[in-house]
Amino acid sequence: MKICCEKNELFERLQSIAAITGGGPTTKSILRNCLFVATDKELQIKATDLDVSACLQIERQEVDGKGELALPAARLLSLVREVPGNRIIIEATKDGKGATVCSESGEYSFKLLGESPDEFPEVRGFSGEGALELPRAKFAEMLRRVAVAASRDSSRYQLTGVFCEIEGGLLKMTATDGKRLTTDEMEIDNPASAATSGIIPNRAVDVMVKVLSQGEESVKFALEETEVQMSFDGGEMMAKLVEGTFPEYKSAIPSEVKSEVTADRGQLVAAVRSASLVTDKETEAVIFRFKGKEVAIESKGSDIGESMIRVDVEKEGEDVEIRFNPSYFVDALRTIDTEQVRMEFFGSERPGAIKGELSYRHYLMPLVVN
Amino acid sequence: MDAFYCSVEELDNPSLKGRPVVVGGTPEGRGVVATANYAARKLGLHSAMPAARAVRLCPKAVFLRPRPERYAEASRQVFSIFEKYTPLVEPLSIDEAFLDVTASRLTGSPGSFDAEGYGAGEAIARELQQKVEAETGGLTCSIGIASNKYLAKIASDLRKPRAIVVVPLGEEEKFLAPLPIQKIWGVGPKMAERLEAIGMKFIGDMQRLGVEPLQRALGEETGEHFWRLCRGVDQRPVVTDQEVKSISQEKTYGEFLDSGDRETIERELFRMSDKVARRLRARELWGRTVQLKARDERFHTVTRSSSLESPTCLVEEIYQAALGLLDDRVDFGDRRIRLLGVGVSGLTSEPRRQLDFFDSGELEQAENIAAISDAVRRKIGDQAILRAKMLERGEEKGPEDDEPDAAVRPPRP
């Protein structure tokens, strides 16, 4: 089997699946491989870690001979990056357990040891019944922005993903690491009959955001009892849902707005970043004092000094004084892409909300002094 | 300093020069080599080698008994030279130190007017190296110049003896790329094995791999940690002796602890964490960085630290962090443990606590309970309230407080 394909396309595919093939220290070596499958009609690249699987098409290619080839994905990715030229040639060795990878001109040639393709676990095809049809780019963007708040702490495993709920014509997404909480929703054109929910694990979200970010087409999305399935132009994906119950987050979201503030997003990001230069590693807190037509952003580092930066704002409601971790605050502002940012405050020991253009909300828990 | 103990010996006894010299161990083959000079190193001798083996490899080597007081004296002399260049000197050991020369300039030495800012580092290093050699009468040192401590340390070890290695600003990654992964701080044999398993041989391999695959292979935090180190990122400041603000507790075990004896190790860490936590509370301090120190039977010492989400004064948090460090970042194989230590730094008297959406005030409650138990222990004695975890099996009394701390235990009325 001999494959000739475009370097950039292959590189992108390998990068998309890197979250699956990376594996942990105990991962079986075959799972660190990606599987090339060539048939008469098409060339696919598959990856699975038994929990998350993906099967992607490689479009611009020429294949000589049918067959399968398993190659170590991370290693292949770094080779593909090095090879010069626009196209890349992968030719299976005679025993089928490896390949030569070379540039089209032949100057660069690597012999890469792989594994027997027979050992590669089966990657099931899409079978999602009653799947939702969702706009691909919008879905990917929503997922990306919500996922920012998902916990990376494995000891809070039920928070290590994006919680999806399908209910009453809406798809809702929520993520939280306890300190911040993001939510967003979109209307569904063809709602499924039964309400369902599930936590899509971070690793799957990473891959989904990468493979879905481009393309105007729709994506088929099936949220089932224990897994989520997706089918889209150019591939399919499947992931086991995180076992466990997502916390009762709705009661944690405050409702009585005390003040509403609008500010220039760029100015605010710059100000908070500057203030964060003068915080102690021990405290990492920046005080926001919203008063009248401005916010005073103050910080203090016991061995460094102090900062005081003023930014003009529009405010309705009470004056507020609240402390946030500056990096969480900046992360939150970065998920918004409007020039002006709107914020809501509910009291100095209640979360603050940073509002996106439509339904996106990014809640941040403040810091308090003991 | 280059082969410090041996160099001091050669200084005091010039006839040793050029001969293989070993400090530590005896010619009869007892004990362990503490330092070997460069002539001995050429013959394959190195520190921590059993003297018996050293004798076999090099029967002609001169074995000297260590003279710690003399080395300390020489060390003080060298450190006093360092202090002429910057007040920011952080001793790392008797013969190693970090110097922050960001704000230093060479003055009074003709021809070095352009030596300012980052470029001054090299000029200062050159002068410092000459001055140390001249003023001590012949002790030589090697210097690494870099934008942070971690890289400076690697650079200083790279081409000993009498070397000056500069890591140009902005070329940190390039500098590290060709070095083997073992050069990374904290990469011991076991970690090296794990990295090699994912195809990492040189630091450059890790740089190309990216953070996510590293995290998957090593775990979230460790992956992130080594991702920073492989790109030369290290933001720890140079801290002088006086500035160090930490509370710590350590214990040397006459009878070494078995690395596999979890129960004992956990109990010891818990007891030390408890002492540290009580001392923090007695001073109304909270700390955010937990350090673990461990030394194995071959005198190999490691210190590891990690930062907590919020500053703490609670035994559980300190203990969990210390245990986590021991499990994830210390690899002694089956070598026994001769010292353990737990410490907390990054102290503050005004802690800011990050609120949590799903936390129901457990931490505040825990701090209240701790304060009450402190009060009871002060009044009735240390044995009044103990955690089961601190007791040995079949033991009814906890450990005696071997280092009474005045702040923790004021004299009884």
Image (tube, rainbow, N blue to C red):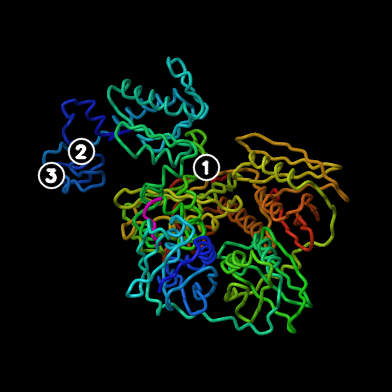
Q: Are marks 1 and 3 on the same chain?
A: yes
Q: Quadrant of residue A147?
A: bottom right
Query: Which residue corresponds to mark 3?
Result: B28
Q: Which mark is residue B22?
A: 2
Question: Percent x, y for residue A97?
Answer: 35, 73
Q: Which secondary structure lies at badge 1?
A: loop
Residue bounds of the magenta highlight? B198-203
Q: Which chain's residue wears label 2?
A: B
Residue A232, placed above or below residue B385:
below
Of residue A111 and residue B104, the one placed in the foreground of this image is: A111
Query: As shown in the figure, which amino acid type bears the numbered disc 1?
Result: Gln
Q: Is residue B97 visible?
A: no
What is the C-alpha distance between the residues marked 3 and 2? Answer: 13 Å
Question: Percent x, y for residue A22?
Answer: 47, 65
Quadrant the N terminus of chain A occupies: bottom left
Query: As shown in the figure, which amino acid type bears the numbered disc 3?
Result: Glu
Q: Which mark is residue B235?
A: 1
Q: Residue at x 45, y 39 (%)?
A: B149
Q: Residue at x 80, y 53 (%)?
A: A342
Upstream in the sequence, badge 1 or badge 2? 2
Q: Residue at x 67, y 70 (%)?
A: A163
Q: Is residue B364 visible?
A: yes
Q: Which secondary structure lies at badge 3?
A: loop
Upstream in the sequence, badge 3 or badge 2? 2
- Mark 2, Cα crowd under 10 Å, few <14 / some 14-19 / many 20+, is many
Of residue A211 and residue B74, the one placed in the foreground of this image is: A211
Q: Which chain's residue wears label 3?
A: B
Q: Which chain's residue wears label 1?
A: B
Q: Which secondary structure lies at badge 2?
A: strand
What is the C-alpha distance between the residues marked 1 and 2? Answer: 37 Å
